[in-house]
Amino acid sequence: MPSLFTFADRPSYSPTSARSRRALAAAIAFGVTVTACAPDEPVMPELSFEEALQEQLITAQPGDVIEIPAGVHEMTRSLSLNAPGVTIRGQGIDVSVLSFKNQIQGAEGLLVNADDFALEDLAIEDTVGDALKINESENVIVRNVRTEWTGGPLTTNGAYGIYPVQSKNILIDGAVAIGASDAGIYVGQSTQIIVRNSRAEYNVAGIEIENSTFADVYNNVATNNTGGILVFDLPNLPVQGGRNTRVFDNEVVSNNVDNFAPEGNIVGTVPAGTGMMVLANDSIEIFGNRFADNQTTSVMVVSYLINGLPLDDPNYDPFPEAIYIHDNNFESGGENPDFEALAMLSEATGQPVPHVVWGGAIMPDADGNPSKTASDILCLGEGGMTFSNLDAMNGFAAPSFDLSPHLCEQPRLQEIILPNDLAGAE
Amino acid sequence: MTGIKALLGITLLAGLAACGDSTPNFVADARPARLSEWGLFELSADRLAPLPALEVVRPANPLFTDYAHKLRTLWIPDGTQATLVNNEINYPVGTILSKTFYYPSDADGNVVKVVDNGAREIDLGAARLIETRVLVKQSGGWDALPYVWNDDETEAFLRVAGASRSLSMVDAAQPDAPATQFAYFVPNENQCSGCHTTEHPDGGMHPLGAIASQLTASAHDAAGEFRPQVDTLVARGWLDTAPTGPALASFEDLSLGLETRALAYLNMQCGHCHNPKGAADTSGLVLTGKHATRVSTGVCKPPVAAGGGAGDLQYGIVPGDPDASILHYRLASTKPDEMMPELGRSLVHAEGVALVREWIGSLSGACGAEPPLSSAAD
């Protein structure tokens, strides 16, 4: 019976094949039925490099190392990894390139939902959306990885370069992130985080720690972004209450690129020329950094309320508290602020915007009075910088330049030590 | 580079066993390279038909997949039975679900956009086969296997990395309109779990269509009787007890109110990720119709990590103003980094977008002011 059912001469699919098929069906008048046991079985299709790589990622077992050879490898669809314990390793940050410039499907370049994951020594370029998204994963290493949009800072670039979210024990070391229309290195809703020895350039936000706890951000260079380093806490998210982040020994220099984020995104509100911004986070320690030529201001500490966005979240604390800024090197900056209230301030004083500006909002108590003192909110150590309390909640009516209420210390925060960081801290 | 894993070896035995059998082949933990090895269908030159032993099922509220038609089958091994646990169907090991995606086709090789009336077999003379997804209950849980049909429509091969097909679609309702070219994407196995794992990251995969609320909907059984599909399963002895409760609301059910239909649509298309434990909980947007707060429904909710998907808009839903609503923008987009759902479509589901548009337009209220902290340079 199967011999009647030889498809060797059956046409490939073509504009006429439906007709041909009908003709063939008529020719086999008795409606031969098989459950597909033809002896000359149809041939398995060949896989492209891209398909073979994705197949490897799907079938990987714990302990596998998937090697990406040297060269530029064109990808048309998102890659994804769900298997734990896998390392993806190229031959160098500029040697092994996964190029998505012809991507036609998927919102990311590489999407990872996998514990004990490492990505090393390769680049992900020109994805339509995020370059590397790591969702709900534990023990993550991203080392010597570059994410880049090669056309420069464009609104049409993808949102995030390196984007771990709702993850734990995250080490980002020696990364390079260029051209993200939101944040180059963005760690969201996560805990136990190190971002070090990395470079973020030509992103809207260079490095952003958002709705996260226990992070160390050090020995990085953030330059030519709209804002260099952001530490944010936002409402209406399943993980919030961002706190305990140390930002130290970074070079935060010349972050003056015009904001090119698509509208509607929160980083779209960051003024060009922002060295660092702390929004609504608590227990942040900023020390040993060099701030230079950030032309709005070096460090801005603000509440969520400054955005004027509607707030419908009883569990959310919009006010920053216990911010400790000490022993930094503040150089030039604040000379061309991209923020109207600061421009007016600068014009009124004839001076650049101070190195550190604070919105001035403090959580009110039941009677509407401030529930905390200025030194509970922001300590500037022994000073050594210029400062302004912007009085933002009163429409910037009476800004103050007196840093004496802030000549205080906060408890030093603990170093972050990750179980998956075999090299350890410096 | 490590070698590509040999997926194929373990399954040869199953394939041989398929010939002439009247029931499918379940082999524990097998991942056959060829769809035929499951023995689910009778294939001839002019038709693809499920074995008579299979039950053809149809969910109340289906997912949109680029207007593809879907032939869905269910098979439970002889001597086993699904049980109702917490009013949900708990399928026994060996259960095989299949879903064949195909399009009606015309004489010029175009695929045709036309309403899917739920054919119980596929006339290959007037259709083009694309893929058959198999969801099989193993002892460790559900396993998803995407099979892609060859051009000759003689076999479908396991493609764990998915595939794509360039298609040209004409609209039966607009015969004079030009054809639409698009790429149909067969998901890879990880993408399968993107929808079928509704509790991220540790929940297992499970069916979305062959569940109690979906199969409580009535359909014609093999004998032509129109009745709740769960009753058919009970009558066959495949299910111990019929679930209680109503069938899932369908966005296509015009007897329902506008909001009910819109929320049913969003629940089905979006809720598998946008639920409090889903992969998209990072966004804080919940589209299951069960909401803790108004803002979590998207009303006046600023985007979190939408990037260009925000479409230069401020809020998920602006009551009364669909054109200012990110939700509408993303449903109406076909850009891979902007569109929602992220998977399962290359085309806009015009009827679904129209429904959501009408619903947003019917909402009353307004969102807050422009943020004052905006760039002076703007």
Image: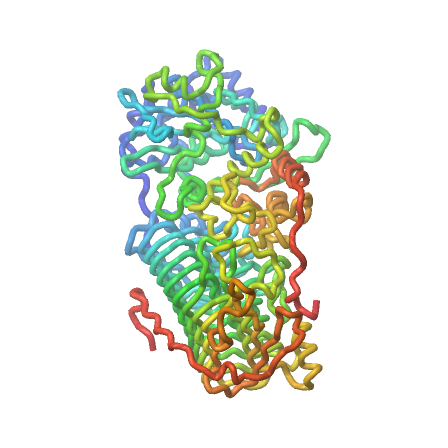
**Residue B59 appears at what percent x and percent y?**
48, 27
Seen at 49% across and 29% down, the residue is B248
Report if residue A206 is visible in the image: no
In this view, the residue farthest toward the right is: B176
Above or below: residue B230 compared with residue B287: above
Q: How many marks?
A: 0
- The image shows residue A36 at horizontal and vertical percentages of 38, 25
| Figure quadrant of residue A285 | bottom left
Query: Could one spot residue A299 in this view of the protein?
Result: yes
- Residue under the point 51% across and 82% down: A405
Q: Is residue A309 above or below residue B98?
A: below
Looking at the picture, does residue A361 appear above or below residue B153? below
In the picture, which quadrant includes the C terminus of chain B? bottom right
On the image, the x and y values in percent for residue B177 come to 71, 33
Q: Is residue A185 or residue B83 the one in the foreground?
A: B83
The reply, left or right, for residue B265 in relation to residue B35 is right
Where in the figure is residue A296, as x and y percent of width and height?
62, 77
Please name whichever residue, B343 or B267, is drawn nearer the observer in this view of the structure.
B267
Q: Nearer the viewer, residue A28 or A280?
A: A280
